[in-house]
Image (cartoon, rainbow, N blue to C red):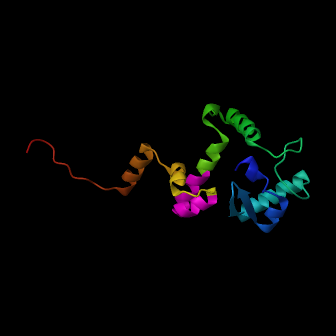
Amino acid sequence: MTKAELQYVTKEAVQRGCLEIRNKGKSRKIPIPLKLKVALEKYMKEQGIQKGIIFLTSGGKIVDRSNIWRGMKKLCEKASIDEEKVFPHNLRHLFAQCFYAVEKDIAKLADMLGHSRIETTRIYIMTTGVEHKRQLEQMEMVLGWRTGTT
């Protein structure tokens, strides 16, 4: 989610249970799962948020990519993870892969990500050779090979 999209994460949207995001001439609705709604309501209560945008800096500005990146880098340090491999956009890819693993619906995923082209969405769910090998091994198919000379 970009800074332009974070402005739509408001107390009112949480209460409705749905974000209505308008960005780059597109409009989409993102439902807020119940567990996330409960967590956000708890966060808003703890932070004393009465209305409006939920994620603001201490200076009152909308949280942006650099704020998120700094937080992620601190977590990397605590978790002993190479911070050079972690970026806010990785979360978008993680969401896409998890969503697709459950739903297997690339059109619905494209809608959730705000993509107008399925080809763009495919980039988010591409798997590696290691993943392909694991999937093939799970299929437990045995291929017969003839070795030696014929």
Provide the major secondary structure of the magenta segment.
helix
What residue is rendered at 63% in x and 60% in y? Answer: 112
Q: In front: 5, or 146?
A: 5
What residue is rendered at 41% in x and 49% in y? Answer: 132
Q: In front: 30, or 45?
A: 30
Q: Is residue 103 above or below residue 145?
A: below
Residue lying farthest to the front in this orientation: 25
Magenta-drawn segment: 95-112
What residue is rendered at 74% in x and 36% in y? Answer: 70
Residue lying farthest to the left in this orientation: 150
Q: Where is residue 102 shown, x and y percent of the image?
A: 55, 61
Q: Where is residue 149 shown, x and y percent of the image?
A: 9, 42
Q: In front: 97, or 122?
A: 122
Residue 66 in which image quadrant: top right
What residue is rendered at 39% in x and 54% in y? Answer: 138
Q: Where is residue 115 shown, x and y percent of the image?
A: 59, 56
Q: Where is residue 114 shown, x and y percent of the image?
A: 63, 57
Q: Is residue 127 above or below residue 38?
A: above
How many marks are shown on the rendered structure? 0
Quarter of the picture containing the C terminus is top left
Residue 63 in which image quadrant: top right
Query: For residue 4: magenta?
Result: no
Tell whether 49 sits left or right of 90. Answer: right
Q: In front: 67, or 114?
A: 114
Q: Is residue 34 above or below residue 97?
A: below
